[in-house]
Amino acid sequence: MSLFVHDDEENDKSTIPLNFSEPDIVPVYPEKAINCILPLKYQQEIVEDTLTKDGLLIMGCGLGWDIITANLLYALSTPFVDSRTKKKKRGLIFVLNAQDDELIRLQEEMNDLNWEDESQHERLVIINGDSQPLRRKKLYAEGGVIAISSRVLVVDLLSLIVSANDITGLFVFHAERIKETSNDAFIINLYRDNNNWGFIKAFSDDPESFSGFTPLATKLKLLRLSNVFLWPRFHVTISQSFNIKNKKDISRKSVTEISVKLTHNMNKIQSAILTCIQSCLGELKRHNPTLATEYWDIENVHDRDFVGRIRGSMNSSWHRVSVTSKNIVSDLSTLTNMLVGLINLDCIGFYQNVQRIVSESQKVQAGSKYRSQSPWLNLDEAVTVISCAKERAFGKRDGNYMFEELPKWNELGKLVHNILQEKRTSNLKNQGPILVVCSSKWVARDLTRLLETMQEEKIGDKRVFSCRRFMKDQLREYAHWRKEINPVVRRIWEEMEAEEQKEDESDIVITKTFTRNGQPVSKRRRTRGGSVAARVNQLRAPENFEAVDIDQEMLLELNEDEPIDQESDSLEFEKTQEENQEVLDLINETEQFQHDFDFVHIDKEEQIIVQAYNDKFNASILQELHPSHIIMYEQNLPFIRRVEVYQAINYENPAHAYFMYYGDSVEEQKYLLRVKREKEAFTKLIKEKATLGKHFETKDDNAKFQINRNNIVNTRIAGGSKFKTETDESNVIVDAREFGSSTPNLLYRIGINVIPCMLTIGDYILSPKMCVERKSISDLVQSFSSGRLFQQCKQMFRHYELPVLLIEFDGTQSFSLQPFSAVKYVRSTRDEPVESEIELNEQSNIQSKILSLLYAFPKLKIIWSSSPYETAQIFLELKANQEEPDVGTALDKGANRTIETGDGNPPMYNDDAIDFIQNIPGINAVNYHILIQQVKNIEELVSLSKDKFISILGDENGKKAYNFLNRKIK
């Protein structure tokens, strides 16, 4: 037998049996293309880049955030096949830090995408803070795109209502606003610590907010990202997309700039206000040399948050800042608002605003002889502002008021007239309405009234559009205002005049910056007109700050009815529903319109729509209206970009755009500065991105702070203490309502396990013996006013051995009660120092209440924390050598388990009502729980019969309560 030949019988015995099983059939779904609506090339590239990589997207303002983010979310929310269950599943995507109007706009875009794709699954779900946990858990299980409050989501993550591994990704809006102490950063850390496969995508269209040292690296570290996508307006792809000349643009003139000159008085007022701001900044630097920064310069006056940034740099030392400095900061806000009002308000409205500011300053000074008026009113330029404002409003020629009209009004009237004439005579392809856009709804209301009442006049060969009828309406409103406030102003003047007779003029305290050329203040009783005292007296004179007397004959003429000729050349207009309601309410309240509205149909090509800028809905307005002409009455960079996007999309039928601005004015400088700042911000970010280091992270890496062993380890076990090691978890039970603060986030970052619960007693449970009630300064003042803090301390002492009151300050504010207690400062008129005249009524009131609290609870511990960072460190030290708290025990304390709630959480009590009923004889801390289960409110309580009281409280207590409530007093 050959060695290579086997018998069949032997072959059967030597064969190894093999078992074959049918593999699981994985369902194969047909490929489905994702239909995105991205008409421009740069939009397509942005979506492609962001889909392939996680990162931070920073765009220039007005480049279409809504359509880009909607397409991104639509593509990311496409259903997929789960490898574990072999079933089709929708991803769970959370949208964070989005505003309400942004969510509405996002819903509209996603609904359009669903309609194009014939799908109703990828919709945006908005969850409010008052939703029940069971409903949220059901929505999480269904998946989809969910917009939710960060405060709600962080509690759900810590409570395991939703697991981090079940989340497909996070989409963060307004990445520039994310701070390391915010709940959004807390969510990102919780998500990335437990989920390393999901995506995180962040978006921002405000590059100017990325400031400071290495802002890009700092923000990427905070967002747990490593990539960044920069898309400025000067990007090559964006410039090519907006180059509509290459797309057969017939007109080649898509934008027309209309530069309007300011009047002589407006120029004088503008120069005077800028000089006042310069003087205030110089005085502020002189008083605060250690706080002054390079930003305190007149060149930055046109920034959106100029005064806010100055105030922010002084917050940490605000309690040490002098009264003069605080008044100057307030004056800076007033002066910057006056600059805006000079451009937007009519002459009467601007004068009324100036009059109100001066009157309020005089009222403050008249309230106490030790107080002085606003520092800027002591400057020569203040008199210029007041006199020129009065001349604009009530200057007369030939016995009539001139009513200086804003130069833009005439140009707007001529422009609208020419457009309507052009539409009637030519066959334009685009026959849409005329869209006029402005800065606010108040300006839109005035422009609507202007276009309705404007009349065409001819002066020689020139065509002029008069707005005198509108100004007469404004004069009526001013007359009503003057009638209301004139007695008050006169009384203030009389009080000041009587006070001046007692005090010497040399007692006026004025800093040297607010004197002419630094000259010393005159000490003589009689002064020349150029001295400081004389200038102050000149400003205080009735003719300078008292309301102007209106000619009675003019008032009689204005009170007569002025019917509007329906056949005149008044311009028709169309208003949105909201503006219609505002105008109708205004008519009913002020009776300033003396004619009736006639509602008639207006053809689309003859409609004039006045709309205020809205960064969230600008794109939808343009796409819905399809205007033939767009008139930008005031500058707005995001809207100008929106118009560019609209023109690029509708290049075959573009709208003609007009851009109006005041040449050589603060309006022009503000727009140019905005463009310059955005370009500089992107240039800085591009340079930082080029030198940005690579970031690598492993599973062992943790973004939490390292805990010092000495703070958590107890090596002494005498007396029954529990031995703790570095691996043992440290827990803190936190009230779910406390997640509006930064403390839970910082506790998690230092390695403490945060357990959210609905606590009845306390805010933080550190151990079975230690309970902490946290109060911010505003909460502390409110709790003292309502008396709730005493009740909270009473409950803590009833259930815990070591009750603690934590008074926490904001890290950006000064560590002092002084700024929060409304300290009243006064100015000394003698040689005593100013500090000796300081009244600390409110501050001493808070301190006395704290002393009263300690007197009532001598064993109460009070912790003063300068910031949430300090609070986290204090909690870590307090937990050393302490046992870990038990969740069940903490929930049981102060809660009545006989009362059931729908969500299973402890019941929430009205402490004020409970305190009230316990003052009734027969109702005490033992039986009030039984009473509140059967009685809904106090109204029902006082209506109970005697038998019902006895059945609830017992025979003796029931009779006491009934007799007390039904006792008749003669």
Image (tube, helix red, strand yellow):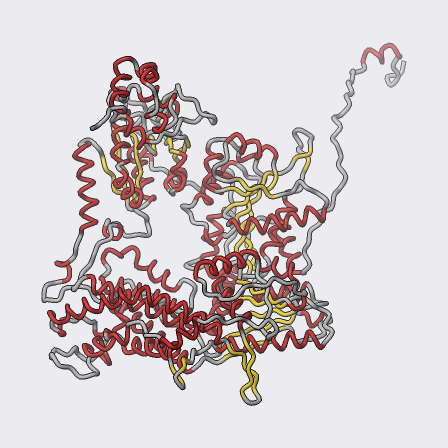
Query: Which of the 4 image quadrants contains residue 8?
Result: top right
- Residue 218 x, y percent position in the rendering: 45, 53
Rendered residue at 12%/78% (across/down): 523
Please tell me which residue lies in front, 508 or 71. Answer: 508
| Quadrant occupied by the C terminus | top left
In front: 342, or 423?
Answer: 423
Query: What residue occupies the far left of the structure in this picture?
Result: 831
Left or right of 541: which side holds 223?
A: right
Question: Left or right: where does residue 506 sit relative to residue 232?
Answer: left
Residue 572 image offset from top left, x and y in percent: 60, 68
Which residue is rendered at x = 68% and y = 54% of the image? 37
Residue at the spot x=33%, y=66% of the render? 483
Residue 138: percent from left, percent from top? 57, 31
Q: How many marks?
A: 0
Q: If the image is split into quadrants, where does the N terminus sit? A: top right
Q: Quadrant of residue 748?
A: top left
Q: Is residue 766 visible?
A: no
- 949 vs 559: above or below: above
Placement of 530 over or under 12, stated as above or below: below
Q: Is residue 169 visible?
A: yes
Q: Nearer the viewer, residue 909 or 541?
A: 541
**Residue 239: where, in percent of width, then height?**
63, 67
Where, by quadrant of the figure, is residue 427 drawn?
Answer: bottom right
Q: Is 707 left, or right, of 586 in this rendering?
A: left
Decide: is 657 above or below 105. below
Instruction: Looking at the picture, tell me which residue is in the foreground, 194 or 309.
Output: 309
Query: Which residue is drawn at the image coordinates 33% and 37% (left, top)?
Result: 708
